[in-house]
Image: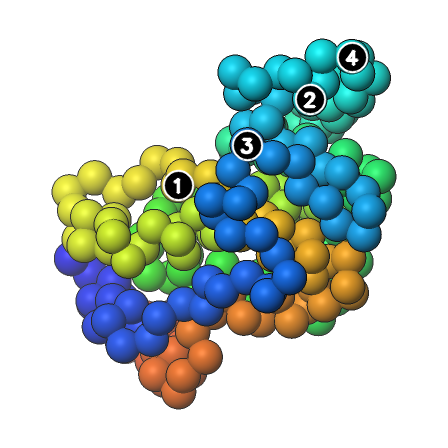
């Protein structure tokens, strides 16, 4: 158990619940399960829906299947040169829903997201998140924005899965002998919230609300940065 992990757990997870509440006009988990998501009159075909036993909704709509397959092929084509991608179906869902647009254009949202991932990488909770953070910085430095976009979105899914699972698996993930290799995919409700805020141009707000909103988190960040400064000091 590292000091960083202990501080993260005691200063943040035990005291400050993450804000997981979706917008009031979004469906609940039970309502969204097995149904297409509709945002601004656009139907978003989820991987769970495409793989569910109930195929009647799409029995006469081969175009829908083709669109989803095209989205999956589009993701696979891009990610051939991007290591560490895990949530292929979720990426296909999201990029199909937004018309294959660039998600990460808001520099404030980018900076906020990178900072949150940086803090997690400092705690050494997940080597996967650490690698993702390093690769994001590399793609950004090289202006490889297409690779950056797909990796940042996949990393967002990993982070969202971490947030949803931390209350139940916090002790195992933070203090267990084996750190999580891959975090579970986020729920459809959480992805709905992400898409809803993106459509409403509230993406930077959505990202900022992923971190704890209390002063304890700020103190944790300051303490971690101080530890890094001390570590880099030479006698």
The residue that label 2 is drawn on is 57
Secondary structure beneath label 3: loop
| Mark 4 touches mark 2? (CB < 8 Å) | no
Residue at the (54%, 70%) spot, across then down: 209
User: What's the residue at 66%, 36% (across, down)?
Assistant: 36
**Which is nearer the eye, 75 or 187?**
187
Q: Which residue is at a point 45% across and 79% down the rendered structure image?
A: 213
Q: Quadrant of residue 177?
A: top left
Residue pointed to by mark 4: 60
Q: Residues within 10 Å of mark 1 (few under 14, many from 20)?
A: many
Q: Is residue 96 visible?
A: yes
Q: CA distance from mark 4 to mark 1?
A: 36 Å
- In the image, residue 103 sits, relative to residue 94, either above or below, namely below
Question: Looking at the rendering, in which quadrant would you find the C terminus?
Answer: bottom left
**Residue 53 coordinates in the image, percent (x, y):** 52, 16
Residue 199 horizontal/vertical position (percent): 77, 57
The reply to whether residue 69 is visible in this rendering is no
Where is residue 137? Give x, y as percent: 62, 53
């Amino acid at each position: 158990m590292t000091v960083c992990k202990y501080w993260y757990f005691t200063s943040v997870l035990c005291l400050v619940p993450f804000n997981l509440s979706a917008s009031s006009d979004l469906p609940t988990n039970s309502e969204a399960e097995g149904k297409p998501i509709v945002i601004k009159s656009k139907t978003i075909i989820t991987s769970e829906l495409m793989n569910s036993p109930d195929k009647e909704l799409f029995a006469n709509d081969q175009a829908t299947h083709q669109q989803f397959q095209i989205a999956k092929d589009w993701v696979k084509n891009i990610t051939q040169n991007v290591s560490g991608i895990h949530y292929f179906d979720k990426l296909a869902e999201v990029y199909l829903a937004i018309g294959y647009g660039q998600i990460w254009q808001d520099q404030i949202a980018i900076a906020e997201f990178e900072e949150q991932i940086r803090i997690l990488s400092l705690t050494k909770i997940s080597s996967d998140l650490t690698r993702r953070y390093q690769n994001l910085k590399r793609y950004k430095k090289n202006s490889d924005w297409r690779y950056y976009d797909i990796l940042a979105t996949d990393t967002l899914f990993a982070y969202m899965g971490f947030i949803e699972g931390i209350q139940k698996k916090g002790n195992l993930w933070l203090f267990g002998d084996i750190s999580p290799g891959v975090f579970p995919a986020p729920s459809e409700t959480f992805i709905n919230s992400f898409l809803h805020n993106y459509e409403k141009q509230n993406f930077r707000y959505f990202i900022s609300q992923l971190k704890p909103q209390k002063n304890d988190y700020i103190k944790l960040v300051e303490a971690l940065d101080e530890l890094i400064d001390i570590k880099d000091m030479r006698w």
